[in-house]
Image (tube, rainbow, N blue to C red):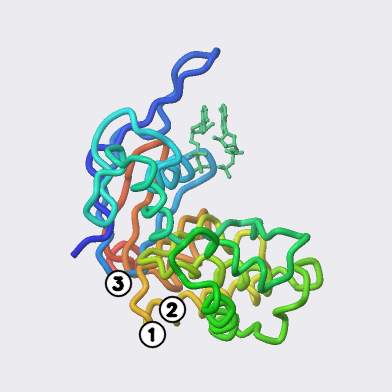
C-alpha cells in the first residue's frame, strides 16, 4: 500500500506582488516502508509540498491523499490525527529550550489517550531508542546539535506515527553527525518499518539512504524513480 498519493498538486500563492505558482503539477507516490527522498534547490517548492502533506497549507488544485484520506477534506479532528501520524523533524530541531530533554519528548503526548502513568515510560523508551537515556534531565542547550536532533526524532515518534517526515533534518549538521542521524533513520526504517520521507537539498543524503526519489525544480517533478536507477553511474 501507499502512505501518500499526490496527483497533479498545484499551489499558487497570491500576495500584493501578484500570483506565484510554487507547485505547478506535482504527482508522487510514497510506498509504505520506503525511505523516500524529495530533493531540490532552495525555492523549488519542497516546504510548500511538506505543508500540503501535513495540512498546514491548502492546495490550489489536484489531490493529496495521506494514509488513504484526502487532506483537504479533513476537519479539525481529522487534521489532528493526521499530524499525529506524521512525525516531523526540522533543520533547527525546534526543541523547547526551557524544558528538559524528556519533557520535550513528552510534549506531543499531551491531550492524547496515552494514560499519564505510561507517558514517562514511553518517553524513556524513546530516548533509549535514540541513545540518549542518560540525558533525560539535561536541557537542549547542554547537548550537541546531533544529540538535539536525536531528541527531536524521539519527540517526533512519541505518537507512534506511520510516517517520519524530515525537512532538511541534517542541513545544520557536520558530515560525521549527519551520518549518525542517517544511520538512525535507516534503523527506524529497517527495524520498525517506519516510512521515512527525507526532504533535502543534499544529494549525498538521498544517495546514502533513500530507496526512491523525486527531484523537484521550480514547482515541477523533473525526475522520479528508484535511487538506484536515477543515480546509477553511466
Ligand atoms: P523550498 O522549500 O524548496 O525552498 P518553498 O516551498 O519554500 O521552497 O518555496 C517555493 C516558492 O514559493 C518560492 O519561490 C517561495 O518564495 C514561494 N513561497 C513559499 N511560501 C510562500 C508564501 N507563504 N507566500 C508566497 N510565496 C511563497
Ligand atoms: P524554507 O525555504 O526553509 O521554507 P523560507 O525562508 O522560504 O524557508 O520561508 C520561511 C517562511 O516565509 C515560510 O513560512 C514561507 O511560507 C514564507 N515565505 C517564503 N517565501 C515567501 C514569499 N515569497 N512571500 C511570502 N512568504 C514567503
Closest to the observer: 188 or 29? 188
Give the SS element for disc 2: helix
Answer above or below: position of 92 versus 145. above
Q: Position of residue 183 (x, y in %)?
A: 51, 80
Q: Position of residue 161 (x, y in %)?
A: 40, 66
Residue 134: quadrant of the picture = bottom right
Residue to which mark 1 is pinned:
191
Q: Position of residue 168 (x, y in %)?
A: 55, 56
Q: Quadrant of the N terminus?
A: bottom left
Horizontal side of residue 149 vs 2, given as left or right: right
Residue drawn 22% across and 61% down? 2
Answer above or below: position of 67 versus 19. below
Q: Is mark 1 within 8 Å of ligand 1?
A: no
Marks 3 and 1 sit apart, C-alpha to C-alpha, by 10 Å
Residue 234 visible = no
Q: Residues within 10 Å of mark 2 (few under 14, many from 20)?
A: some
The answer to whether the residue labelled 1 contacts the one labelled 2, judged by CB atoms less than 8 Å apart, is yes
Q: Earlier in the sequence, mark 3 or mark 1?
A: 3
Q: Residues within 10 Å of mark 3 (few under 14, many from 20)?
A: some
Residue to which mark 3 is pinned:
33
Give the SS element for disc 1: helix
Furthest residue to the left?
1
The answer to whether the residue labelled 3 contacts the one labelled 1, judged by CB atoms less than 8 Å apart, is no
Residue 173 visible = yes
Residue drawn 54% across and 14% down? 17
Residue 125: quadrant of the picture = bottom right
Horizontal side of residue 182 vs 71, given as left or right: right
Furthest residue to the right?
142
Horizontal side of residue 155 vs 23, given as left or right: right
Marks 1 and 2 sit apart, C-alpha to C-alpha, by 6 Å
Which label belongs to residue 188? Answer: 2
Amino acid at each position: 500500500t501507499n502512505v501518500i498519493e499526490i496527483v497533479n498538486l498545484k499551489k499558487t500563492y497570491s500576495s500584493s506582488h501578484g500570483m506565484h505558482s510554487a507547485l505547478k503539477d506535482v504527482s508522487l507516490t510514497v510506498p509504505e516502508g520506503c525511505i523516500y527522498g524529495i530533493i531540490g534547490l532552495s525555492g523549488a517548492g519542497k516546504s510548500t509540498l511538506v505543508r500540503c502533506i501535513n495540512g498546514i497549507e491548502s492546495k490550489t488544485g489536484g489531490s493529496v491523499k495521506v494514509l488513504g484520506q484526502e487532506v483537504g477534506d479533513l476537519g479539525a479532528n481529522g487534521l489532528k490525527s493526521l499530524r499525529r501520524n506524521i512525525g516531523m523533524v526540522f533543520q533547527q530541531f525546534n526543541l523547547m529550550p526551557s524544558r528538559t530533554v524528556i519533557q520535550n519528548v513528552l510534549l506531543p503526548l499531551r491531550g492524547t489517550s496515552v494514560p499519564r502513568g505510561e507517558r514517562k515510560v514511553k518517553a524513556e523508551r524513546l530516548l533509549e531508542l535514540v541513545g540518549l537515556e542518560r540525558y533525560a534531565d539535561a536541557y537542549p542547550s547542554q547537548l550537541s546539535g546531533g544529540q538535539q536532533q536525536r531528541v527531536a526524532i524521539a519527540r517526533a515518534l512519541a505518537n507512534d506515527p506511520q510516517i517520519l517526515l524530515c525537512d532538511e533534518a541534517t542541513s545544520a549538521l557536520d558530515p560525521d553527525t549527519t551520518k549518525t542521524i542517517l544511520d538512525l533513520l535507516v534503523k527506524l526504517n529497517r527495524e520498525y518499518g517506519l516510512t521515512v520521507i527525507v526532504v533535502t537539498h543534499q544529494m549525498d543524503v538521498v544517495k546514502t539512504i533513500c530507496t526512491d526519489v523525486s527531484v523537484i525544480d521550480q514547482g515541477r517533478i523533473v525526475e522520479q524513480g528508484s535511487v538506484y536507477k536515477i543515480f546509477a553511474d553511466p
